[in-house]
């Protein structure tokens, strides 16, 4: 059923009234959760409860992965001095664009290892890095679980991996494809976020540009029009 579970006033509207959700203690429907999530780059100073972080990691643990390889590990930084040291190293020099991570109360280093033999063989034959797909799925579980818990989050791919690996003594066969920031969002900042504005973050390609039925380039919409 089209739009089921989404309040009528929010249908097709990218600007949700977030306050309406953040102050509610109710369970959100999946469609609402997906609309609610956005890349939050400014957080309140309020610390994040470890139980909530544990829930996010549990959601990641439940994620599917090629050959069930589960190629992920997570280092959660919520202790101020370690977190600040890591955030400064990660956003130094050419990575200064990611300075906002210094203001996040929780920084998660997402670690990846190049899969089991079976998954790696599959990746080789298919020329597709399945382990990175697995990591993406696990991270999305984290950020959606965070949203359900009224927490903001942001993926960060632009950071100094080398420095972080050295700082935490991470073995060479393990990489850090992503960082995640988590914290209680400073909602006032959302509209002012220059990164969001520059990246046109609210813009999404229309469905008829990304969805084809029964053949490449055959959008459902076009077909409907044609049969008129
Ligand atoms: C793999 C990945 C890497 C990203 N890296 C960064 C980053 O380094 N810095 C940043 O500010 N945002 C980063 N983002 C967030 C995107 O800019 C954001 O998801 C996109 O603009 C859509 O906006 P929204 O998340 O608010 O819907 C990243 C997102 C993904 C999925």
Image (cartoon, rainbow, N blue to C red):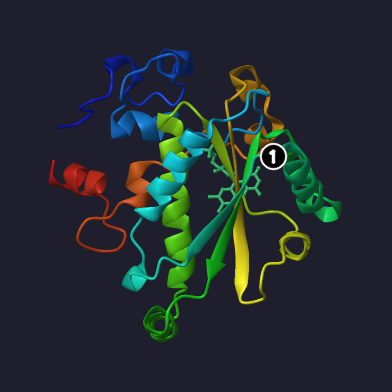
x, y (%) of residue 49?
53, 30
Where the N terminus falls, by quadrant? top left
Rendered view: 24 above or below 98? above
Question: Which residue, given by chain and number where applicable, does mark 1 sit on?
Answer: 79
Q: Residue at x 72, y 33 (%)?
A: 103
Q: Number of labelled discs?
A: 1
Ligand 1 sits in quadrant: top right
x, y (%) of residue 122?
37, 82
Label 1 beta carbon less than 8 Å to ligand 1? no
State which quadrant residue 228 falls in: top left
Going by the image, does 18 lie left or right of 184?
left
x, y (%) of residue 53?
50, 39
Q: Residue at x 62, y 21 (%)?
A: 186
Q: Residues within 10 Å of mark 1 (few under 14, many from 20)?
A: few
State which quadrant residue 185 falls in: top right
Q: Residue at x 57, y 30 (%)?
A: 48
Q: Residue at x 67, y 35 (%)?
A: 104
Rendered view: 183 above or below 93? above
Going by the image, does 35 lie left or right of 168?
left
Q: Say which of 51 and 186 sits in front.
A: 51
State which quadrant residue 101 falls in: top right
Indicate the secondary structure of the residue bearing disc 1: loop
Rendered view: 29 above or below 98? above
Q: Say which of 121 and 85 sits in front.
A: 85
Q: Say which of 117 and 202 sits in front.
A: 117
Rendered view: 19 above or below 1? above
């Amino acid at each position: 059923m089209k739009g089921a579970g989404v309040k009528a006033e929010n249908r097709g509207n990218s600007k949700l009234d977030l306050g309406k959700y953040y102050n509610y203690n109710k369970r959100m429907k999946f469609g609402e959760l997906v609309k609610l999530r956005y890349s939050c780059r400014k957080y309140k100073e309020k610390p994040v409860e470890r139980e909530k972080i544990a829930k996010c990691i549990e959601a990641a643990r439940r994620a599917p992965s090629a050959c069930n390889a589960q190629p992920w590990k997570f280092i959660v930084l919520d202790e101020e001095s370690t977190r600040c040291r890591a955030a400064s190293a990660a956003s130094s020099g050419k990575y200064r664009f990611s300075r906002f991570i210094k203001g996040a109360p929780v920084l998660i280093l997402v670690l990846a290892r190049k899969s089991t033999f079976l998954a790696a063989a599959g990746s080789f034959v298919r020329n597709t890095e399945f382990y990175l797909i697995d990591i993406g799925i696990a991270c999305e579980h984290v950020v959606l679980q965070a949203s359900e818990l009224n927490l903001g989050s942001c993926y960060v791919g632009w950071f100094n991996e080398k420095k972080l690996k050295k700082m935490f003594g991470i073995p060479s066969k393990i990489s850090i494809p992503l960082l995640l920031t988590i914290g209680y969002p400073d909602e006032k900042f959302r509209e002012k976020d220059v990164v969001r504005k520059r990246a046109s973050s609210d813009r999404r390609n229309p469905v008829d540009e990304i969805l084809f039925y029964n053949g490449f380039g055959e959008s459902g919409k076009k077909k409907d029009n044609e049969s008129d």
